[in-house]
Image (cartoon, helix red, strand yellow):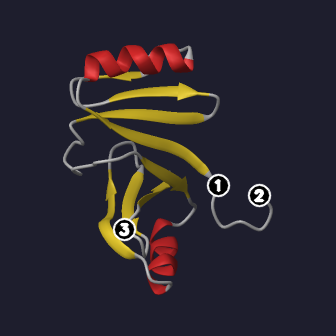
Amino acid sequence: MTGSSTQGIKTVLHPVSDLAKAKEVYAALLGVQPTADSDYYVGFEAEGQHIGLVPNGGPQNMTSPIAYWHVADIEAKLAEVTAAGATVKETPHDVGGGRLVATFTDLDGNVLGLVQDR
């Protein structure tokens, strides 16, 4: 990705209606057990990617999977995409461990995410 201002998509979150059953399906798909396993979130690490399961779309009210682009400067990237026409959905906020996340919608209403690790 020479010249790209992102580190690529490394995180994808999926809203699920039955967390226990979804956990079994994703464990079978990925061939690994969860690295994070709670009532409000199940996360898997597989081949450099993080796959998360969010029961009932979580507080973000997710209705479809969200791909998160990893960036070095979340504020700068959010300003860049909004200047190009995107609309901020969730402003940058810490979700633990110094990880910042934000979401925005593109011109067609697709929700995209940004992640910055400190």
Q: Residue at x 63, y 53 (%)?
A: 8
The local secondary structure at tag 3 comes to: loop
Q: Position of residue 118 (x, y in %)?
A: 49, 53
Q: Position of residue 17 (x, y in %)?
A: 23, 30
Q: Residue at x 24, y 51 (%)?
A: 60
Q: Which numbered disc covers residue 7?
A: 1
The local secondary structure at tag 2 comes to: loop
Q: Quadrant of the rendered structure where residue 103 is?
A: bottom left
Q: Nearer the viewer, mark 3 or mark 1?
A: 3
Depicted 103 relative to depicted 30: above or below: below
Q: Residue at x 41, y 28 (%)?
A: 43
Q: Quadrant of the rendered structure where residue 86 is?
A: bottom left
Give the crowd class for mark 3: few <14, some 14-19, many >=20 residues within 10 Å: few
Residue designated by label 2: 1
Q: Position of residue 83 (x, y in %)?
A: 47, 86
Give the crowd class for mark 2: few <14, some 14-19, many >=20 residues within 10 Å: few
Q: How far apart, in angstroms, are the residues tagged by discs 3 and 1?
A: 23 Å
Q: Position of residue 65 (x, y in %)?
A: 40, 45
Between residues 34 and 86, which one lies in front from this camera angle? 86
- Of callouts 1 and 2, which one flags the residue occurring earlier in the amino acid sequence? 2
Q: Which numbered disc covers residue 77?
A: none
Depicted 77 relative to depicted 68: above or below: below
Q: Which numbered disc covers residue 109?
A: 3
- Of callouts 3 and 2, which one flags the residue occurring earlier in the amino acid sequence? 2
- Of callouts 3 and 1, which one flags the residue occurring earlier in the amino acid sequence? 1
Whether pointer 1 and pointer 2 mark residues with C-beta atoms closer than 8 Å, the reply is yes
